[in-house]
Amino acid sequence: MNAFLDIAPDVREALAAGRPVVALESTIIAHGMAFPQNLETAWAVEAIVREGGAAPATIAILDGRLKVGLSATELERLATATGIAKASTRDIPYLVAAGGNGATTVAATMRIAAMAGIPVFVTGGIGGVHRGAATSFDISADLTELATTSVAVISAGAKSILDIGLTLETLETLSVPVVVYGADEFPAFYSRASGHKAPMRLDTAEAIAVLMQAKWRLGMAGGISIANPIPAAEEISAARIDAAIQAALAEMPGRGIAGKEATPFILARVNEITGGASLRANIALIKNNARLGAAVAVAYGRLQG
């Protein structure tokens, strides 16, 4: 185990015994939702993973330590504290050296999960190629991390604020397998449909686990993106959500918002514009992803056993 890791006792015991573990990110807690919904959602997602037969391991950086599995006190600290950095992979060494605090993005969570030996990670949505990237060059490190770090990432697809077509093209260029669970169309986070065909489709957790095993036993390093469409009863139409996103994007230049600040700002404004519907959908999809993630971790564990 890496010397900078602090692995919670229940997670350490599960890993040592070969039991399934599911990694969870912390950006959604510190930056994705307001208190108390953020803390309530974190507790609920961990409970769903446990009910599915796996140990949850929420990942963050606290006081310069890479935390794999958080206590109730640490979760509450993330949910209520100010000044928690949004930490991508590049920020990990800086926060460790400075003894700082960071809520980990998809990329950073993947890297720390891999350090701890956790092959399955559940999030809300992956980052990708931002709209207007041809001039801004704003492309998430989540994509390059997926190309290099051998963790299966279960999400509701790329965030709706992104250019989903270019995100899929980039993942293809990076040789990242993109699988849609139980559907023929790639999902768009709040919506089940994006207008883009699923690159690959698998219909069971067991089939996903077999893919994971095949990729890594072939010696092909890097992650797998597993897109799990939001439940139909919880989705927001693509037209409604896109109108809200366009309105939020139009406000950004006047507010001087760019880079890391863009996604939290857009998500918050979209929630305001939709009257809270986007937050409800966000909570529903992360819970749905946790159910699938636990099933995949259990199935993958059986293959390894």
Image: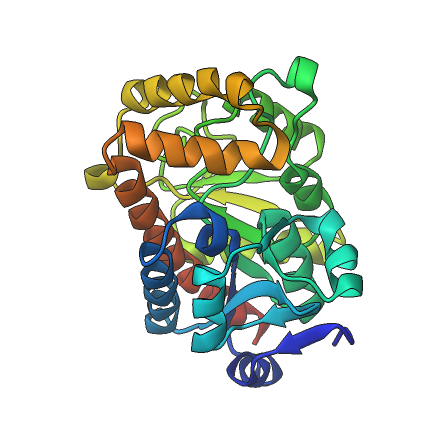
Q: How many marks?
A: 0
Picture quarter containing residue 239? top left
State the quadrant of the C terminus: bottom right
Q: Is residue 191 visible?
A: no
Q: Residue at x 75, y 72 (%)?
A: 4
Picture quarter containing residue 95? bottom right
In the displayed structure, 144 sits above or below 246; it is below
The answer to whether residue 241 is left or right of residue 223 is: left
Report x, y in % for residue 8.
56, 80
Picture quarter containing residue 147? top right
In the displayed structure, 15 sits above or below 253; it is below
Question: Which of the two residues, 67 or 157, is positioned nearer the viewer here?
Answer: 67
The answer to whether residue 1 is left or right of residue 20 is: right
In the displayed structure, 227 sits above or below 1; it is above
Q: Residue at x 32, y 59 (%)?
A: 36
Q: Residue at x 30, y 37 (%)?
A: 278
Report x, y in % for residue 279.
31, 42
Report x, y in % for residue 291.
35, 59
Question: Which of the two residues, 257 or 298, is positioned nearer the viewer here?
Answer: 257
Question: Which of the two residues, 292 or 244, is positioned nearer the viewer here?
Answer: 244
